[in-house]
Image (cartoon, rainbow, N blue to C red):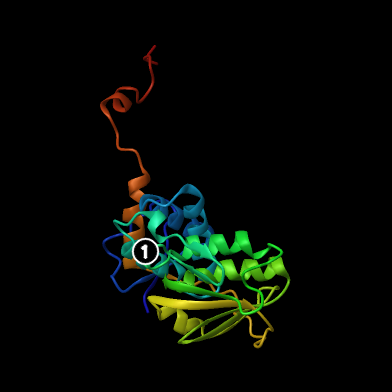
Amino acid sequence: MHVEKHNPVGDVVPAAIPKTARILMSRNEIATLCFKAARGAGMSWGHAEEAGQAAAWLALYGLDGPKSLAAHLQGAAGKSWQDVCPDVRPGLWETAAGTPLCPISLGATLCDFAALPDTPLANEGLETGPVSRPLLVLPFLSAVAEALEKPVRLSWPGGDIDLGPEGQISGATEALAKAETERLHIRTGTLVGETTRKPVMAPVGSETLEFLNALAMKTTVPPSDRSRAGAGGGTSDND
């Protein structure tokens, strides 16, 4: 595997780096780039910030969060973000139109509702409609487990993942990373596995980085005649 160090000065992947290369980035670099990419894709400021932090959290634990976010943003292109937010109902959260849920919106809403006296994760838990790139929900469930001070279990047809209140993660994380769209079952329960993924920053694929950079560039303001005219000093400094 070809691994390059990321150049923090420029965001664009140099042409000389092979398409199969994987680039090492810091957690802050990933969070910042993914935030800008989410904003460029049309996410609200708050959800874009959550998206950046979620992708960076996953990368910290060796999971390709940036790739999952890039795939989600690509799949959601052209859709109204209101159409991919959860319609909150007892026992079942899904979009009003039955389209795949945005994992960022789902995760943020779970964090808002989890601490309520009648938390939707108690007893039989919560079922969801199809969720796009469900790996991105894990950081939010980890935060929920910490807030509730009890484990949270995520289940889907391909396996289970347990998240503990002290950052424990165990289960079929690699299988979830490959999932494109899945219906989820989320509930509080007993921590079955005690394995915690050791923080090992996952490198980012150059194609993923290129795609995210392209979205991030949409947040920049193109130069205008007025901005060009105002550039530089207003008076001459020649003596």
Kind of residue indicated by mark 1: Ala
Residue 220: image location, x then y, percent: 36, 42
Residue at position x 34%, y 22% in the image? 230
Residue at position x 39%, y 75% in the image? 181
Q: Quadrant of the N terminus?
A: bottom left
Q: Is residue 4 visible?
A: no
Q: Is residue 138 left or right of residue 22?
A: right
Looking at the image, the residue that sits furthest to the front is 90
Q: Quadrant of residue 204?
A: bottom left
Q: Quadrant of residue 125?
A: bottom right
Nearest the camera: 35 or 114? Answer: 114
Q: Residues within 10 Å of mark 1 (few under 14, many from 20)?
A: few
Residue at position x 45%, y 84% in the image? 175
- Residue tagged 1: 97
Element marked by disc 1: loop
* Above/below status of 239 relative to 175: above
How many marks overall? 1
